[in-house]
Image: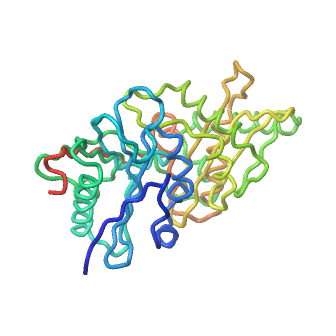
Amino acid sequence: MTVSVEIADPRTEPEPHGWSGFRAAGGLPAVWDYDLLALESWAARNPPLLLVVREGRRIVAGATVLVCRPRLRPAYAAPPRRRGAPVPLWAEVYQPWLSGFAGVAFAEDVDEPGTAELLRRVERALAARLGPRLLGVLYRAVDTTLAAALAGRGRLVRQVDTVSVLANTFGGEDDWLGSLSKSRRSSVRRSLREVERRVASARLVIRGGPARDDLHGREIAALVNRHRAERGVPRLETRSPLLGSYFHRFVKRPDVHTLTYHDDEGRLLALNTMLENSRCLVKQHWAALPPADGGVRHLLFDSYARAVRHMVSAGVAELSAGRRPHDVKRSLGFAPRPVYGVAVPRPVMGR
């Protein structure tokens, strides 16, 4: 059967036929939605492309790929199809708002040899689309199986970090707390009591649920981007800040659960988004004001307790909480799962 690769720029090109169905069938989280990719793309220095691999008319794989440029002015990407001086590019197969997960997904019936072959086709298609300026491709946050499929002569495979995962072996929050060390269990319970006291005295309002229509995207974006900046942007960061328009649509989705903490004057103090699918609950964006600026202590631990409750009630297999800070997550019972980076220089792309 004929295998083809379709490349779509969400800024200017229509959604590939069948993509929504593939995403739904595979349980891909909301960040793979084509409309959200378009909102992300217009504000990005390194805008994503969506690559769709078909066998005949059927989609068997998809990938989000950031087209990356040197960190030079201007802050945003050039308009689509704009001509200008050639600038070296590299491509990152990456799902930037899904920490610890690769930017590639496959149909359930694609086996390991098939995975390797489809990824080589993706690389050849990228080389053809981006031309001689393309220096190579970097796969971020791939798991052990995908790293093995990508390995080969001239390809650099390295473990770069771990992602924190909590298996759902609990009957409820008390079971989870009972699995922690004595000191951590005591500190978490103390934190939860302090949060409850604030709620009882009406100094703190906590709301959580899917499809939130009571939130302002601009306020969420300001808090999330501030939090990221205060934690320090990595030197090799290729993501751009998300805009209020993105969050305005994002939190209204039925598969996005948003937990918020407001003070008694309605000021947003902290929030946590969680992405739902049938296999895994992803604890995604977390952002909070520091106490020096009016924030409240202990909210992070409260958010973990609520995420565990959600995981148990939903009956999903695990809760994924991204990467750093590793020490905090280990103390909360999360186990590390290795993630790899794979660098593929231009001369060996597609081979």
Residue found at x 29% / y 39%? 89
Q: Out of 101 and 164, give the one closest to the viewer.
A: 101
Q: Is residue 266 placed above or below 168 in the rendered structure?
A: above
Quarter assignment of residue 146: bottom left
* Image coordinates for residue 125, horizontal then vertical, percent: 27, 58
Outermost residue toward the right in this view: 201
Outermost residue toward the bottom in this view: 1
Left or right: residue 267 versus residue 228 is: right
Left or right: residue 12 versus residue 255 is: left
Q: Out of 345 and 300, give the one closest to the viewer.
A: 345
Q: Out of 110 and 182, give the one closest to the viewer.
A: 110
Left or right: residue 110 versus residue 79 is: left
* Image coordinates for residue 346, horizontal then vertical, percent: 18, 46
Q: Is residue 224 placed above or below 152 in the rendered structure?
A: above
Display colour scheme: rainbow
Quarter assignment of residue 296: top right
* Image coordinates for residue 28, horizontal then vertical, percent: 49, 62
Looking at the rendered structure, the number of numbered marks drawn on it comes to 0
Which quadrant would the N terminus be assigned to in this image? bottom left
Q: Out of 315 and 172, give the one closest to the viewer.
A: 315
Residue found at x 66% / y 54%? 257
* Image coordinates for residue 13, horizontal then vertical, percent: 47, 59
Outermost residue toward the left in this view: 153
Which quadrant would the C terminus be assigned to in this image? bottom left
Outermost residue toward the top in this view: 292
Residue found at x 31% / y 45%? 91
